[in-house]
Amino acid sequence: MRKARKTRNDTTDEAQQDVHESVDDVYDVVVVGAGAAGLNAALVLGRARRRVAVVDAGQPRNAPAGHMQGFLSRDGMPPAALLAVGRDEVAQYGVELIEGRVDHIAHGFFVHLDGGPALRARRVLVATGLRDELPEIPGVRERWGRDLLHCPYCHGYEVRDQPIGVLGTHPGAVEHALLLRQWSDDVVFFPHTMEMTGQERRRLTAYGVHITDGVIKQLVVDEDRLRGVELAEGHVVPRSAVFVFPRMVPHDTLLTDLGCEKGEDGWVSTDATGRTSVFGVWAVGNVTDPRAQVVTAAGIGSAAAIAINHDLLQEDVERAVDDHRA
């Protein structure tokens, strides 16, 4: 198979001809991203006897986490183990797994791999997730996913009744601190450089969250364990776990380049099945929903797969009717 020409705007007849020549056959669906959403969609589509390819770059968002929680029958399972089992399951139904990164998707659903061929598809499902932008505080990136945490529902129970800190580096950090009081009576909120309102201070104090003002210098680590939060003036507040609310940035370039509309929240808009505003394009998981946990992403992946299969069915039936008339 010859490599497709790597241009971002294949709009001329010559370019489209070049792409056509690089494609041997057509997939019913190409899924971009092999996380829980993408793999579950591929599983349902494979069982529906659709021809499916899944392309994945091997960089899952939850890779730093040792375990995942809140997924019935998979509670405590390492994320990497879930994905490994998922790959094995979809492969049993003939789903093709391709290791690589998608450079862009040309109109007509030609999925261009970075440094590889173009895959032609009838429908496309994008499940590329998001990236977490962390505050530039020494120790944060090194402890991420270990004892520097994000999701209370994912990790709160594991650090229950421990001294917990919450970094005030995001507008949602105050609500984060209030929520974490459900797991510990010892929660300290560090405003850092955040300007708090009087109402925010009253809410935290009334609910039993202690506020420690001052600019954060670093997280203190000793013997590969988090020991506390050090302020610029030298004071260290002992903590065994710290939560941070990262800035979540969706990997949605593939979608926006295709013209998928965004909502007022700045995220690509979809219906309940993940269908975008562009014909034939679905998007599921964290690329459209920052709050989706693993179990949520898997569920919407299944819903999207069923919707895509029915969409393809209508097209198949219409083509059969036209052929029958001819």
Image: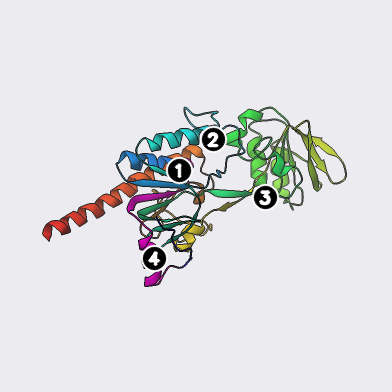
Disc 1 marks which residue?
37
Determine contact: label 2, label 3, CB under 8 Å.
no
> On screen, 166 above or below 315?
above
Mark 2 or mark 3, whichever is nearer to me: 2
Q: Earlier in the sequence, mark 3 or mark 1?
A: 1
Assess whether residue 25 is covered by the magenta stretch: yes
Q: Residues within 10 Å of mark 1 (few under 14, many from 20)?
A: many
Query: Could you classify mark 2 by the number of other residues whose Cα lies within 10 Å: few (under 14), some (14-19), or many (20 or more)?
Result: some
Mark 3 vs mark 4: in front: 4
**Disc marking residue 18:** 4
Report the residue marked by disc 3. 170
Towards the viewer: 280 or 273: 280
Which numbered disc, 2 or 1, marks the residue closer to the eye? 2
Tell me the amino acid under the disc marked 4: Asp
Which of the colour schemes (rainbow, by chain, secondary structure, one colour) is used? rainbow
Left or right: 313 with respect to 277?
A: left
Quarter placement of the N terminus: bottom left
Q: Residue sitting at 49 percent across and 29 percent down?
A: 74
Q: Which residue is mark 2?
A: 80
- For disc 4, the neighbor class at 10 Å (few under 14, some 14 to 19, many from 20) is some
What is the residue that sits farthest to the front in this orientation?
2
**Amino acid type indicated by mark 3:** His
Residues shaded magenta = 10-37
Structural distance between the alpha carbons of marks 3 and 1: 27 Å
Picture coordinates of residue 201 (x, y %)?
Answer: 73, 45
Percent coordinates x, y for residue 173 in the rendering: 67, 46
- Using the numbered discs, state the Cα–Cα distance from disc 4 to disc 1 in whole angstroms: 32 Å
What distance separates the C-alpha of mark 4 from that of mark 2?
38 Å
Mark 1 belongs to which amino acid? Ala
Which residue lies at the image location 81% right of the left edge and 36% below the top edge? Answer: 237
Q: Earlier in the sequence, mark 4 or mark 2?
A: 4
Tag 1 secondary structure: helix
